[in-house]
Structures are given as structure tokens and as C-alpha cells.
Image: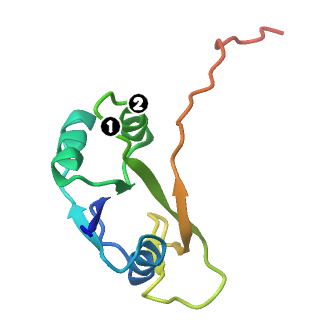
């Protein structure tokens, strides 16, 4: 049986709990391949995923790029995942948590809660009108 390849498309390394969760879902033969560069466009990412034969890709990218990945004709059934991070309520755990500093000196503390599958990215718009009353 060949290894299951999961591409980790992010400039950040996966947390220990994120890696464990992937192996629990997909099996211990899961291999996580980090793609941490800035890529020119979705075509380049799809080509790399195809060459890796990655069936899954955890993507930490702008939503516009994720939208292009989801609708790309060369996708080959790749499942795109989001590592869901929610506000943390407990003390910091380096295996599952991220602390991000804001410009105003505050910190944002999030914890990994599981994986979600990206199904679609939608834009909902309406005409911009100003009431002159």
C-alpha cells in the first residue's frame, strides 16, 4: 500500500496536533509534504499537487486562490482542507495553539479544533447605492 500524501500549503509548519489529526483520519502511513513558498498562481500549485499525487491539501492561502483551486480543471479530485482554528479558552499549548500579536499590542490565542473540507468559496454582492435623504 502506498503512502497517502498530504500537501501542507502554508508558510507555517503544521502543529503537532494538526499532524496527529491527519494521521488519525488517514492512517499512520500518511506523509505530509510542506509547500511553503509563495506560488505565482493556482496553476502552479495544481501542477505541484499533481506531481506529488497528493490526494489532500491543507491550504492556508487567500480565499481567491482557494476558489481558483476548487474550480481548477486540473484538480484531479484533490480534497482541499482547512485547519480550523478557534478562540482558545485554556492556557497556551504549543502542540495545538497559536499566539498571534496584533499591531496594538494585543494577542490573539487560537487552538486547533479539527479539519474542514472546502466545498466552495462564494462572493455575494449587490449594487452599491447611496440613499440621498
Element marked by disc 2: loop
- Counting from the top left corner in percent of width and height, residue 112 is at 53, 74
Q: Residue furthest top?
A: 132
Q: How many marks?
A: 2
Q: Are marks 1 and 2 in contact (CB under 8 Å)?
A: yes
Nearer-the-camera pick, 86 or 119: 119
Residue 17 or residue 50, whichever sits in front:
50
In the image, taking residue 49 as reference, residue 97 lies left or right, namely right
x and y percent of residue 37 in the render? 17, 55
Dot 1: element: loop
User: Which residue: 34% across, 30% down?
Assistant: 72
Q: Which quadrant of the figure contains the C terminus?
A: top right
Query: How far is the residue under mark 1 from the one under mark 2?
Result: 8 Å
Q: Which residue lies at the image location 30% right of the left edge and 67% below the top edge? A: 12
Q: Find residue 75 and name its label.
A: 1
- Which label number is shown at residue 71? 2
Amino acid at each position: 500500500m502506498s503512502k497517502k500524501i498530504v500537501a501542507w500549503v502554508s508558510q507555517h509548519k503544521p502543529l503537532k496536533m494538526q499532524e496527529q489529526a491527519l494521521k488519525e483520519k488517514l492512517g499512520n502511513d500518511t506523509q505530509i509534504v510542506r509547500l511553503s513558498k509563495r506560488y505565482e498562481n493556482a496553476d502552479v500549485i495544481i501542477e505541484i499537487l499533481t506531481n506529488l499525487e497528493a490526494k489532500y491539501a491543507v491550504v492556508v492561502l487567500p480565499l481567491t486562490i482557494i476558489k481558483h483551486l476548487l474550480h481548477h480543471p486540473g484538480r484531479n479530485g484533490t480534497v482541499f482542507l482547512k485547519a480550523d482554528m478557534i478562540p482558545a479558552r485554556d492556557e497556551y499549548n504549543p502542540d495545538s495553539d497559536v499566539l498571534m500579536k496584533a499591531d496594538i499590542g494585543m494577542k490573539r490565542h487560537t487552538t486547533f479544533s479539527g479539519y474542514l473540507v472546502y466545498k466552495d468559496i462564494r462572493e455575494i454582492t449587490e449594487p452599491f447605492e447611496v440613499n440621498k435623504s
